[in-house]
Image (cartoon, helix red, strand yellow):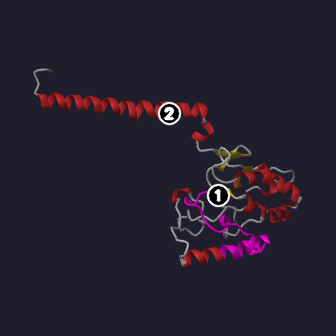
Amino acid sequence: MNRLPSLVRQHIAALRLLLAFTVLCGIVYPVVMWGVAQVAFKGQANGSLVTYNGKVVGSGLLCQEFVNSKGQPLPQYFQPRPSNAKSGAANDYGCDPGYSGATNLGPNNPTLLTNVKQYQAEISKLDGVPVSQIPPDAVTASGSGLDPDISPAYAAIQVKRVAAARHLPVATVQGLVTKFTTGRSLGFLGEPAVNVLDLNIALDEQPGQAAYAK
């Protein structure tokens, strides 16, 4: 080896380092991290999948639409915030993980203002509340378009509508909203939130409510 030219020896040493770090960073490290995740955080590592009646019905990290074949909100279910994650297909109404993204419309964009007013009118009619009671997250999409949570304020204006559609006491529905409301991370990061999928599954699990299950 020492008889080889210096330039050749340097290239051989560099190739050895390349191979060593390829194995270390490209194979060993990912396998170790995968193993640790499967042991310590199996649910999260596998997508935080949510099951109902033994079947995977979604992910706790992704929103999904609760609408009929025409895209109209199902009154017996809590509705997520608007979603711009859609393919443009006729039956795609949002929350499509293959098309995650925001509208990128600024606060003074006339299209955004038109959309907000349209959402306000639709929610006001659906939930029977004045526009002044509709919180911002009910009429704006998240950056990803896949936010699985809504604010407690948005959940609150939907309680009476869901209770009426399911013929359940308002107190029962409100109790479930409270149960599935999570606080700020570490007590100060983010805002309280309600996971829509978990809440709707809990509603379907109530006595006599199985007929509403999708």
Res. 204 visible in picture: no
Q: Which residue is mark 2?
A: 33
Q: Nearer the viewer, residue 193 or 39?
A: 193
Q: Position of residue 144 (x, y in %)?
A: 55, 58
- Helix, strand, or loop for circle 1? loop
Circle 2 Cα neighbour tier, 10 Å, few/some/many (<14 / 14–19 / ≥20): few
Res. 7 visible in picture: yes
Q: Position of residue 214 (x, y in %)?
A: 73, 57
**Which amino acid type is shown beneath numbered disc 2?**
Met
Q: Position of residue 153 (x, y in %)?
A: 74, 61
> Does residue 20 sit above or below 111 in this rendering?
above
Q: Which residue is mark 1?
A: 64
> Does residue 35 sit above or below 141 in this rendering?
above
Q: Which residues are magenta?
A: 118-147
Q: Residue at x 12, y 28 (%)?
A: 6
Q: Residue most toward the right?
A: 169
Q: Position of residue 34 (x, y in %)?
A: 51, 34
Where on the picture, by quarter, is residue 86?
Answer: bottom right
Circle 1 Cα neighbour tier, 10 Å, few/some/many (<14 / 14–19 / ≥20): many
Q: Residue at x 60, y 36 (%)?
A: 41
Residue 148 — which label? none
Measured Cα–Cα span from mark 1 to mark 2 = 30 Å
Q: Is residue 104 magenta?
A: no
Q: From the viewer's perspective, is 84 left or right of 172?
A: left
> Does residue 13 sit above or below 206 in this rendering?
above
Q: Residue at x 77, y 74 (%)?
A: 130
**Which amino acid type is shown beneath numbered disc 1?**
Gln
Where on the picture, by quarter, is residue 37?
Answer: top right
